Each structure stands twice: as C-alpha cells, then as structure tokens.
Image (cartoon, rainbow, N blue to C red):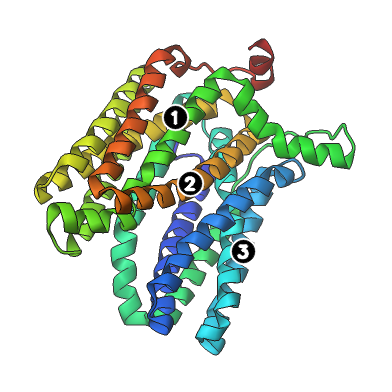
C-alpha cells in the first residue's frame, strides 16, 4: 500500500494541509481575540467555517462532473494557498476591527474550497488502493490526521506565542505550498464521462445525483441515517457544551477541557491505529464492528453525562473516541466499496453538506436544552439519539455487509 507513490503523495500532502488548517484556526482565533477582546467575534470563526464548507459541499457536484478529481483537489489546495497569502498580507497591513468583514470573507472562501476538496480527497483513496487494502488505507489516513489534531492545537498554541499570529499564518502558507507541491504527484487513471443532456439539465442532474443515490440505495441510506444521527448527537463534545459540563458537573477548572479533549483525540488516534494494525480482522467482521462500536458510543455518551468524576470522564472520553473512530473508518470503507469514482465524490459532498448543516443546527438546539433544562439533559438527549442509531443498525444489519458492485446496477436492482 505504501509503495504506491500516488497514495504516499496524497497522505503527505493532506497531512501537511491538515496541519496547516489547525495552525490557521489557531492564528485566526488569536488574531480575532487580540483585536476585539470579544468571544462573539471569536465564535463567528467556526460559524463562518461551517457555512463555507456547507456551501462548498453543495456546489461540489457541479465541479465533479466537469473536472477530474485530481484537478479539483490540486487546484482547490492551490487556491487555498493563494487565499491564505492574501489573508496573511491583509492581517499584516490592514488589521483592525473595521476590516474584519474582509477577513471573514477570506475565511469563508477558504472553507468553501474545503467543501469540495474533502469529498474529492476521500473519493480518490479507492482509486489508488486495491479493495483488500482499503480499510487499512482509511485507518492510516485517519490515524495520521488524528495525530496531527492531537499535537496541532498544542503546538499551534506554543507557536502563536513565539511567532504571533502573523508568523503562524506565514508558517501555514509554507505548509500549504508544500501540500500543493506533493498533491501534484498524484496520478489517477480517471474515466471520462460524456455529458448527454442540456447544460441546465446537466447542472440539476449533477447537483442532485449524490443525494438521489443516497435516497435510492438502501445500503447507502442506512449508513447515511447513522451519520445523520451521529451529527445530531455530536455537539455534546464541542467546547460550548463541555465547558459548562466541566464547571457544573465535574466542578473543575477550564484546564480540564484540555485534558478531556486530549483524551478524546487519543482515543480517536488509537481507533485509527487498531483499524490499521487489525485491518484484516475488522474487514472480515465489519458488520459486527459497526454494531459494537455504535453501542459503545451510545453507552459512553450516557456514562459521560451522568458521571461526576473527572478521572472517569477522561477514561470515558478516550473509550468513546476509540470506538467512534473505528466505526467511522468501517462505515466509510463500506461506502467506498459501494460507490466508485465521481459518484463517490458526489455522495461524499452530499454527506458533508447534510452533516455540517445538521451539526450546526444541533449545536444551537443542544445549547438551548442545556440552558433551559440542565447540562445533563443534553447528554441524555444525545444518548437517546445514539441509541436510536444503534437500534436502526441492529434491525438493518444485513445492509452492513457490502460487496463491491457496479453502483448503477446496484441502484437499479434495488
């Protein structure tokens, strides 16, 4: 698997891009807070990130039909690099509270590009790797990504002190340049798809194709429902929920958010590592893995919500992260085996848009529940949603063993 030069280029290029993304967010938060001293302006950064990624995912299918996957990934990273250079120069020369509209616009555009870069990157993996090594490749990509996440925030915080936000943005720019260079070495033999309809019809067809495939294909629909319910339950791990939980339930200082966050990412990393080292075992029993992981994720969320011990909270969050990550690797491996080439990128684009929109709305609703009722109620609601996801998977477990078939035939037959 690692002998594949294109896969190595994808792994290295995406790793540098992910590291740059982490430093980029740290630099932005530092910049915004230092100028405004306002949590409101800081909170706008993730909202704008989410909005840009959501809209990017919506328009991604229109690009996927017109350009090769490699070109989309490479050019999106190149444009991100150019935008970051503009952002760095603008922050250095014109930074003030009055110029934040332009800064937010550049942030939006950068994440808009990510909206179609991420599904494209995920769709490229099965084009580079044989089916038997697909789960191992996904696990490796995920492990590296989580390792970068674990260290990125800590290192980013230190670098923000040493280099200041301008220096951190320049470092991010360098990482983006290197990422673009490495991604240029990816070689894919992509089939050309002829356009058989008018431009207007083609645009509508391209836009809806991924969504229709999810709705029509029973197996994809079950997996998407699982991801959808997971995105409803997911906000219980964001800072706006964890912070008050630590204070009101664990009765600890805010430094414990860092500990819990580290334990969570450590679990994610170990989940990816297990997927990589035990890929054959996981692949053979992938339906059992998804079911077990789904149940453990529900159970850990419930235990975390009713728990009042800080040390137990660390253990539970680590276990949650491990089983959550292993479940996501298995689910995405099934999706990649079910759908091929450009259709896969469209499915991922649709999933990305659904997940981002659901996660954003759910974050607001969970915040209201926590404020109007109490913080424990938030975790109970999340637990119920995850239990529902587990029960659906249990009832529809026959759909968790997917063989690689021609997607069009699969949809037609079902």
- Please state the horizontal and vertical placement of residue 232, each as a whole percent of the image: 42, 40
For label 3, the SS is helix
Quote the CA–CA distance across marks 3 and 2. Answer: 28 Å
Quadrant location, the C terminus: top right
Q: Please give the label number shown on residue 8.
A: 2
Look at discs 1 and 2 and give the one toward the viewer.
1
Tell me which label, 1 or 3, sits earlier in the chain.
Answer: 3
What distance separates the C-alpha of mark 1 from that of mark 2?
31 Å
Numbered circles on residues, count: 3
Residue receiving disc 3: 109
Is 255 placed left or right of 386 in the picture? left
Per the image, the residue denoted by label 1 is: 226
Q: Is residue 179 visible?
A: yes
Give residue 136's position: percent from left, percent from top.
40, 32
Real-space Cα separation, disc 1 to disc 3, in angstroms? 30 Å
Residue in the image at 70% along x and 32% along y: 209
Q: Earlier in the sequence, mark 1 or mark 2?
A: 2
């Amino acid at each position: 698997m690692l002998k594949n030069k294109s896969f190595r280029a994808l792994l290295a290029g995406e790793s540098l891009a992910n590291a740059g993304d982490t430093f980029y967010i740290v630099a932005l938060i530092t910049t915004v807070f230092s100028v405004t001293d306002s949590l409101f302006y800081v909170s706008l950064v993730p909202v704008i990130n989410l909005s840009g990624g959501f809209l990017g995912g919506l328009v991604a299918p229109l690009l996927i039909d017109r350009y090769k996957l490699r070109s989309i990934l490479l050019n999106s990273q190149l444009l991100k690099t150019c935008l970051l250079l503009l952002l760095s120069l603008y922050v250095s020369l014109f930074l003030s509270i009055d110029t934040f509209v332009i800064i937010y616009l550049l942030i939006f555009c950068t994440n808009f590009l990510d909206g179609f870069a991420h599904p494209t990157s995920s769709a490229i993996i099965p084009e580079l790797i044989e089916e038997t090594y697909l789960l191992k490749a996904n696990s490796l990509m995920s492990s590296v990504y989580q390792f970068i996440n674990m260290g990125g925030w800590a290192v980013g915080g230190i670098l923000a002190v040493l280099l200041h936000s301008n220096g951190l943005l320049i470092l991010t720019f360098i990482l983006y340049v290197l990422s673009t260079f490495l991604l240029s070495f990816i070689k894919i033999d992509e089939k050309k798809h002829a356009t058989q309809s008018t431009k207007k019809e083609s645009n509508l067809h391209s836009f809806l194709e991924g969504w229709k495939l999810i709705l029509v294909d029973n197996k994809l629909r079950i997996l998407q429902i699982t991801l959808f319910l997971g995105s409803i339950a997911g906000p219980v791990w964001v800072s706006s929920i964890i912070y008050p939980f630590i204070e009101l339930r664990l009765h600890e200082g805010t430094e414990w958010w860092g500990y819990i966050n580290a334990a969570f990412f450590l679990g994610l990393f170990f989940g990816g590592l297990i997927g990589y080292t035990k890929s054959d075992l996981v692949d053979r029993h992938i339906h059992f893995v998804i079911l077990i992981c789904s149940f453990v994720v529900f159970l850990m969320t419930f235990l975390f919500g009713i728990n009042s011990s800080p040390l137990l909270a660390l253990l539970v969050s680590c276990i949650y992260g491990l089983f959550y990550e292993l479940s996501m690797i298995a689910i995405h491996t099934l999706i990649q085996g079910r759908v091929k080439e450009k259709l896969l990128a469209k499915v991922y684009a649709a999933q990305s848009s659904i997940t981002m929109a659901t996660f954003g709305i759910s974050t607001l609703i969970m915040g209201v529940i926590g404020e109007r009722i109490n913080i424990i109620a938030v975790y109970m609601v999340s637990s119920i949603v995850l239990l529902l996801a587990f029960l659906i998977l249990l009832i529809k477990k026959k759909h968790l063993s997917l063989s690689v078939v021609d997607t069009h035939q699969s949809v037609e037959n079902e």
